[in-house]
Each structure stands twice: as structure tokens, then as C-alpha cells.
Image: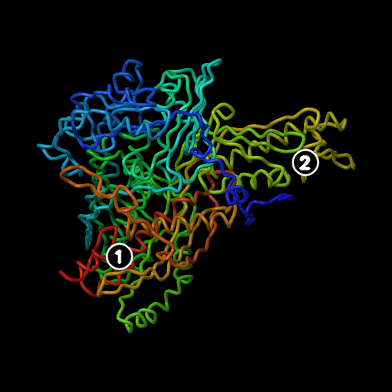
Amino acid sequence: MNKSAEIGQPVVRREDQRFLTGRGRYTDNTAPSDALAVLFVRSPHAHARIVQIDTAAALAAPGVVAVYTAEDTAADRLGHLPAIVEIKDDAGQRHREPPHLPLSIGKVRYVGDIVAMIVAETLDQARDAADLMLVDYEELPAVVTVAQALAPDAPLLHQEAPDNLMCRWGKGDAAAVDAAFAAAAHISTLAIRSPRQIVHYLEPRAAWSEYDMAGDVVTLTLSSQGVQILHRLMCEQILHVPKEKLRLVTQDVGGGFGPKFPLYVEPVLIAWATRKLGRGLRWSCDRSELGLADTHARDLVASAELALDHGGKFLGLRVKAEANFGAYVSMFAPTIPTTGLAKVISGLYRIPAIRIDFDCAFTNTVPVDAIRGAGKPETLFLLERLVDIAAHETGRTPVELRQLNLLRREDMPYASATGYTYDASDCRGLFERALAAAEHTGFTTRRAASESRGLQRGIGLSCHLHGTGGIADEHVVVQVEPDRLIARLGTQSQGQGHETVFTQVLSAALGVPMDKIEIRQGDTRTIPHGGGTGGSSSTIISGTTLRRAADVVVQRGRDLAAERLEASSSDITYRGGHFEVVGTDRRIGLFELAANQPFSGDAVFADRIDSFPTGVMVCEVEIDPETGVVRVDRLTALADCGIIANPRLLAGQMHGGMTHGLGNALMEQAIYDEETGQLLSGTLMDYALPRADDVPSFRVDTMSSPTPNNILGFKGVGELPTNGAPAAVANAILDALHPLGVRHLDMPITAQKIWQALNR
């Protein structure tokens, strides 16, 4: 695009030309051909003692260069993979965090736990060597659910957690909640089990390395959501090497959704072994390995009680929950189910008193961490299902009960009972516009038409929000060259369109054509500071910091222009890519100014990271009662995302997030055998994902309540629709089934579950 852009324009994604013509640079595709192949030997048992590992036969196999076990990593004193956030119990005690070492010592704690690393000339040779590895296990009883883990006679995973309890966490005023329930005219209750889920990105995780012997520098290229945090952890806490001796690079990324953010064992071991061997290595996770290697999410059991007065106003909410953390504490895991729930459990409603109590436990399953929504889709499923149930029990429609309790524009900023401040939104206006966009008044006619064809039709609502998060460690540098601008940022695109929107922000700020702007990311050598991408906050963090850096460019350029134009800096203005002397025709272009001396402007993130985008979703489904098959007929979404940087990109995020949430509601579930701890749905043969014919034509519209928390008024949008879609779809299904006596079904609401409920 050879002209400047403004914020709010539907600019076409500039990345697409590169991707659609096969010029994307993905990790596995760019690995050097002479790199050694790496294969990780994983435990076939959910819980077992390692009696002995015999590597002799594997080491003697053709092409094998090295076989490493925990003895080798312990000898080099490699540290453990830490969490970088924490939670505390009511006594102020930090969560328990047993060490997660790169290779298992003495014991394996889930199917997929790594016990050895094989390095060979080719991957086939590494696989052959793995077949020769002799690992003698003494199998132990396994626990898969929190209830199993916290039972009095449960087998223990870690000495550091003698009762398998990771933390007992709570938030909210229990006394106020007790008083609210004592005064209640009605109390509605609901218990749910939110299924564990696995992300299946187009590009599985991968890594490759190179070694510079002269400088003793390892360069590790990996598929990630941000290299700077991983770099700091690897250098300071695990490998114990100076930061200049390890360089991390991330190129194009084929989807992240959360699980590409944490630090994993595989890249740590590759970086470590590269220096030991003095040669480059390569590894790529295959589809059968992904379900055992990458973090899972969403595994939550919860019950909630909602207290209402005679008029239907909400008085209080009490939530008790069990969070399954898997075998270890992953990087962001402590706050995902806990504060993730607390941020949004009030929904878009005025609920004066809320109390949350969590039991967080270790189990013999893959560790959990963030997946799109990060604790909020299951929270809002719990809340919105409970609101529908309360409506039925008190003789109101779901619309009426929500209208009684929705927050108003004048309530903002609203302090929730769990301690969060909702910044800006017209929740009631959003709700009414969503009903109109969904043609709610015509539903009765559509239901009759469905019934005439022997189908049950239902309509469901979801009032939802997101609390943006992420890591606000951003330092943006904008370099002015004679022919272009180069911006270096610490976030990391995985398909969202960062290059487009950040170019748009800079183009609007400096009046420079978009094709004269280059966005760089993902290299710790040139961009040492950054928080990566997560929590729907990249536009907030990098966008606002980029704008501040652009202001610094103008300030510094004004001084340089004053010298060139022989004027006072106070007489220099900047407009449309040129510095001008007020009241004269003398001016100089930004790039012309840099011809003799390139200069730059930089800034650090200086705004508040938090914002609370809000949404309302309306879903209509048809169900065949003979088979239980669900067809999502309509899905309408209204979103308040503050100032919209690019409507085209927003629509893409909404469509993707709605599809993700639809999959959560109808089909996605990671299933473990509760006796053996074996993952039964670890591949795409057994783990269902939404296809094109599962998805209706979405209707998406927006409102704009700019947040006062950052200079551009941006809110995050990437996770908002995923938070809302599961509840909207579920409420529509249960509305269709309500006349047939079905009160509730847990996700995923499959045809089998529906048929069984109708034929009990």
C-alpha cells in the first residue's frame, strides 16, 4: 500500500501475499539440511518409578550421535522449568511448585513425560535407536481427576505436595455472600464439568539450532508466542549461561492460541545439547506426539449458587471449583483457572457479593496452561447457564432476567465484587442491539417452522467479557532509514495480523506510506525486551508503545530538521511525513532527513494493560430428537472492543474465536482413562474439531466504548468470542430441550449426550 493509512480503516492484511504464495518462513521448513535429528523418548505410563535406563544398544545403533538421560542434565546442573506467576492461599502461602526438570529423574508422572533424548544423523535412525532403548519401569497407581488426587488414600505425585494439593485459593467476601444468601428469596444451583481441551494448530511446535564455535553462541529458532521471556528463563534459571551466549529466534508461526507461549523441555534440551555437541539440531513435534507434549487446558469441575431477591435482582454468587493442573505447574498455569475465573465471574451483571473457593491439584496428566480464553470460557459457561436456570426457576424469560441485572453505561467504571474494575461499556445497549441484530422477535415463527419439520429449535444468549492480560515488558524502537521505517517490537504474531495493524498505527502517526514500513519481531539479539503475545493485549501493548515511539521520532526529527532548515525547533511542525517551518514554504521529508544520519525513537509501555471488552452473543439451533444431531443455524455477535484498529482484522478474530467456542461447546474433549491415565483422544482420529459445515454464517457487529486505560482506546478482541460462544450454543441447545425435560448437559454437548438424555 503506497499511501498512508488511518486507524479504523479496513486495510487488507499485508502478510497474506507472503503466506499465499508459499513464502512464509516456518520453523521446520527453514531448518538446515545438515542439522542432526532429535527424538524424545517418552513415558508410556501415567505414573511409574524409573528402575533403570539402559542406553547401550541405542548408542551403538547406526547414525546415533548421543543419548542423554537425567544423569547428563543433572551433571550439568540444569534448572527446572518455573512458573512465572503465582497464587497464594488465604494464609498468604505461595502455591506448591515441585521442580519440573528437563529429563525425568527417578519417576515419570504422566504419559508423555520425557525420559531420554536421542540425537542421530537422521530421524529414522533416531526412531530405530528409540526401539532399542531399555527403560525398566515399576508402574504405580495413577490419578486423573482432582477428586481422585485429593482422596485420602491417593498415590502421591510429588514429595513437595504430600496431599497432591497445589493450592487452596479463594477470593471474595465470604461474610457478605453469606448475608446475601440469608436474605435471598430464591437460590439457583448448577454443577458443571468443563472438559480438558487440546489445541491443534496448523503448525505443530518445532525447533532447530546452530552453533557458532568462534563465539560459543547457540542460536535456537523455535515456534513460539514470544522469545524474550523464554530467553530470560533459559539463560538465568535453567541453562545458567550469559544472555549473549544464547540467541532465540521466532519466524512465522502457524497458530499459537496459548500453548506456544510456555517454556517446554524440548527447546531447552536442544539448546543445551547443541553446545555439548558443537552441532546444529532439529526437532518437530508430530501429530501423534502433540497431545502428549503440548499443554492442555480447561479441565475444571465447579458448582455455583446464585441468590436472587423477590424482584429477580442478583444478590450474591458462591462458586466452589476444582482445577486440574496436571503433573507440573506450567509457566502461566497458576492464574489461568483462578484469577481467570475471578476476572469475569460477575459477567455483565451487578452482583454485589461473590465468593470463590478453589482446590487446585496435581494429577497424572499433561500439565495445563492457557488456551484461547484462559479460564474464561468455562467460567462464563457456568455463569450464563446458571442465569438461564434461574430465569426458568423464577418464572422469567432469560431475556427478562438479564435485563433486570445488566450493568448500565453510567455504572462504568464498575468495581466487581472480586476486585476488578470494568473500564467502559454500555452493556444494556449492547444487549438490546444484539437482540435486534439476531431478529429475536421472529424466533417464535422460526421455532414453529422447525417444529413443522419434526425438529426442536432453541435460542440461547451469552453476556460475556474478557479481561486482557499479558506481560507489559515492551520496548519499541522505530528506526528512520533513508528509504523506510523499521519498527522492532516484543510481541509475536501467530496469524492475527500484527504486521498489518502495527504498520497502520505507525503510518497513521507519522503519515508514512504503509509500504515504507517494516515490522520486525522475534529475535533476542535485536529485540531484547518484550512480553510476547497472549491475553488479547498485543494491540494494547505494542500498539500504544509504537505510537509513543512515533512521537519520539517526531521530537528528535524536529531538532534535526531545525538544524537542516536553519530554524528554531519551536518553529518546526510535522505533518504528512514532512517537517515544515511555520509560515514558510521550507520543509524536509522524514526520509530525506535521515539520508545523511539515520535516527530513531523508542518508548516503553506506559499505559495500563487491563481492559474489559464486552460482548453479547445470540445463538439458534435445530435438534433432531430422533438422532440428537445439532445444527447451529444462527450465531450473532455484538462486541464492544473500544477503538477498532482494523475492522477487517476484527472480523477475522471474531469468526475464528466464534468457531473455536463452537468447537468447545459441541465436540472438543481430551479424554483420559481414569484407571490407567492413558490419553484416549490424543490424535485427530479421536479428538473432534469443527469443520466448515459445522459453522453457520456468522453475523458480527460492534459498538465502541474506548477504554481510558491506554492512549489509543484499544481493547483486546482475540479471546472475547471464544469466551461467549460456548454458553450461547449450550443455552440454545438446552432451550430446545427444555420442553422435553432436559435441565442441563455439560460440554461437549454431543449428539450422543442429547440422544441419551432424551431416551433415559
Q: Which of marks 2 and 1 is nearer the N terminus?
A: 1
Q: Where is residue 692 in the image (x, y as percent from the top left)?
A: 44, 63
Q: Which quadrant would residue 489 be assigned to in this image?
A: top right
Residue type of the residue flagged with mark 2: Tyr
Q: In which quarter of the image is residue 361?
A: top left
Instruction: Single out the residue that lies furthest toward the front.
Output: 62
The way the protein has been coloured in the rendering is rainbow
Task: Answer above or below: position of 491 versus 117.
Answer: below
Residue appearing at x 30%, y 50% in the figure: 353
Task: Return the residue at label 1.
Answer: 388
Write the residue at 53% across / 44% down: 709
User: Does residue 348 appear in this view?
Assistant: no
Q: In this view, does 303 lie above or below 261?
A: below
2 and 1 marks in contact (CB < 8 Å): no
Label 2 sits on a secondary structure element that is strand
Q: Which of 324 and 244 is in front in this view?
A: 244
Q: Position of residue 440 (x, y in %)?
A: 42, 74
